[in-house]
Image: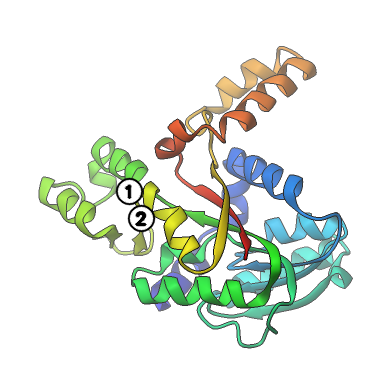
Amino acid sequence: MNKVIAYYDRFDEWGRLDREPIEFIINFHHIKSMLPQQGRILDNGAGPGKYAIELAKLGYRMTLTDLTPSSVDIAKKKAAEYRIEDQFDGFYAADARDLSMLPDDHFDAALMLGPLYHLQAEEGRVKAVRELYRVTKPGGLVFVAFMTKTRFLMNSVMHPEHWKPNHTVEGIRQFLRTGTFDHADEGRFTGAYYFDIAEIGPFMESQGFETMKLIGSSSIAGAMTPGQWDYWRQQGDEAYRQIMDIVIKESENPYLLGYASHLLYIGRKN
């Protein structure tokens, strides 16, 4: 996992969610709408803590973990900046496959919005989901991010030189066989695993979760430019609000799941 740490030491994940806000807006809408009014929440693989910070502002007791120590440090600084440090029960540099510092059946809900697609081996993905199951209370909700073969195949065909070795037919065929991708160019996106969409529900259910929803985190708006957003803002606040309502509603359209760069699985611990 050293390459993952090195990548996120350099990458501005907080800024990515600001530059590409639709993913955060849609995910946070669904998370907030389904959470209990109060409780303990784990943000596991939280990066610099954008989701955890916003949930802490709403009064939830938060615990944050991430593999990359520098990301955990940023999250601590952000909590201090917003004066909500007291809402956090802990900040941990930890691997999602080993949350042994956290007790069983402790959290009312848990987020895992990054680790699964960085774990290329099935054994690692299973360990991470089992740990999520262990620390979540019975009946508690989980929110888990996935990336899919469908969207990455589209990216590879459209921009082959950006995604070597998927710049060749054989590279793409190998990716489709395995779901794994390792960038041929040093310093680019880390090695990752991409799911078939139809496998996501059964995978989580095999580890004891009940599937509730599968959300396309970019809905119909993932490819929109700032200028295209400006058009709707210029129509006035009410028109913009209604467009956002449509975008959020369409995030649950199952026919759009392959278009989204990230999917949000929502499930409940049986």
**Kind of residue sitting beneath label 1:** Lys
Residue 89 is situated, as x and y percent measured from the top left of the image, at: 80, 77
Disc number for residue 149: 1
Residue at x 59% of width, y 72% of height:
133
Residue at x 23% of width, y 45% of height:
161
Residue 185 occupies quadrant? bottom left
Residue 178 is situated, as x and y percent measured from the top left of the image, at: 23, 60
Position of 76 with respect to 258 (left or right) is right
Disc number for residue 194: 2
3D distance between C-alphas at marks 2 and 1: 5 Å
Residue at the far left in the pictured view: 170
**Kind of residue sitting beneath label 2:** Tyr
User: Cβ–Cβ below 8 Å for labels 2 and 1?
Assistant: yes
Helix, strand or loop at mark 1: helix
Question: For the residue carrying disc 2, how many other residues have a C-alpha within 10 Å: few (<14), some (14-19), or many (20+)?
Answer: many
Res 267 visible: yes
Figure check: 92 above or below 234: below
Figure label count:
2
Residue at x 60% of width, y 64% of height:
47
**Frontmost residue, 234 versus 245:** 245
Position of 172 with respect to 152 (left or right) is left
Figure check: 101 above or below 257: below
Residue 180 occupies quadrant? bottom left
**Frontmost residue, 10 versus 149:** 149
Residue 12 is situated, as x and y percent measured from the top left of the image, at: 56, 57
